[in-house]
Image: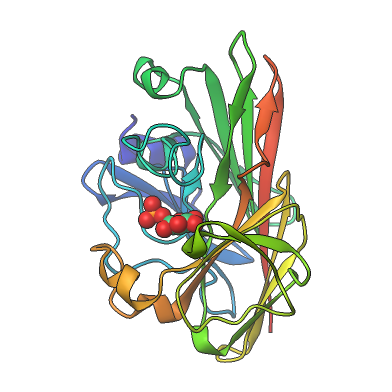
Amino acid sequence: MMLATDLQKRFGIPDQVSIVDLAPDYPVININNAHASAQVALHGGHVMSFQPHGHEPVLWLSGSAVFAEGKAIRGGIPVCWPWFADHPSDASLPAHGLVRSQFWELQAVDQLDDGATQITLSIQDTPESRTLWAHAFKLELVVTIADSLRCRLRMTNKDKVNCDYTGALHTYLQVGDISQLKVSGLDGVDYLDKLADDKRIQQQGDITVDAELDRIYTHTDAEVVVNDTALNRKICVQKQGSQTTVIWNPWLDKSAAMTDFEVGGYQHMLCVEAANAVDDIVRLAPGETHVLETRLSVKK
Ligand code: BG6
């Protein structure tokens, strides 16, 4: 991996993009353009923060997050891939796949005509990854920082055989007060309740959160709107290439059991994840590409 100083020389843009070490040998990209500020870690291809000017931060990042190789960052947008949650057949493999806990490569930093900044990161198979997931692949994450945030995860099958995978852009949204939220967009959609042995339940009306919640909404490409009365704003989560939306809040006990989860943080976050999971499995023939995209925008 290139050093932060070398990355800065190659990709830095005065007053707009700088690359620095957040911890030893742990480069992050700081972006500040006409629309917003953001931070993206090379580790995990991980968007850590996004804040349009004049708004509160859109993403929640745990104050106890750990920045070290091999440990996924708690908060922001972890990239879960090539499997979502537990591995389907081998519980000894890491949850949420392989790429959220490895360094990616910075490929490009582009200034767009409208003042937006586009960051492209990539990761490919290695001899080690092939022992855990037996395919050649190229993943690219294209992050566009404008007054909205767009993340496109482009997966290309570089293998000679078909491959199947699941995954998610595991977005942690920052909210003012979880108990005052109303989450709309999923009325009438069936979900699997992970807290009740994957029982299938139909959503009635808006979602409110007053306890732990771990739900996989199936067969939906709907926009989800998080109505946050405490911060007096709405966050709109749109997506493409996904028929599955995961809504998660660990609440008090589960969050307290995670050493990297800031104390009390569960009151200020909600995950709304654009996913490919359950029967929404992506199958790619050799050379084919699939794009999973999420877009976050804020309205006062
Ligand atoms: C969610 C899952 O997507 O991620 C939850 O639905 C899981 O079941 C959560 O607990 C966090 O996972 P992790 O591995 O980052 O602690």
The percent coordinates of residue 136 (x first, y second) are: 52, 16
Displayed quadrant of residue 146: bottom right
User: Which residue is located at x 33 percent, y 49 percent?
Assistant: 20
Residue located 75% across and 52% down the image: 219
Q: Nearer the viewer, residue 265 or 298?
A: 265
Q: Is residue 226 visible?
A: yes
Q: Quadrant of residue 160?
A: top right
| Residue 93, image quadrant | top left
Quadrant for the C terminus in the image: bottom right
Q: Is residue 258 above or below residue 5?
A: below
Q: Position of residue 51 (x, y in %)?
A: 54, 69
Q: Position of residue 66 (x, y in %)?
A: 26, 56
Q: Is residue 182 left or right of residue 188?
A: left
Quarter of the figure with the N terminus: top left
Ligand 1 quadrant in view = bottom left
Horizontal and vertical percent position of residue 246: 59, 59
Q: Considering depth in this image, is 285 or 4 the residue closer to the camera?
A: 285
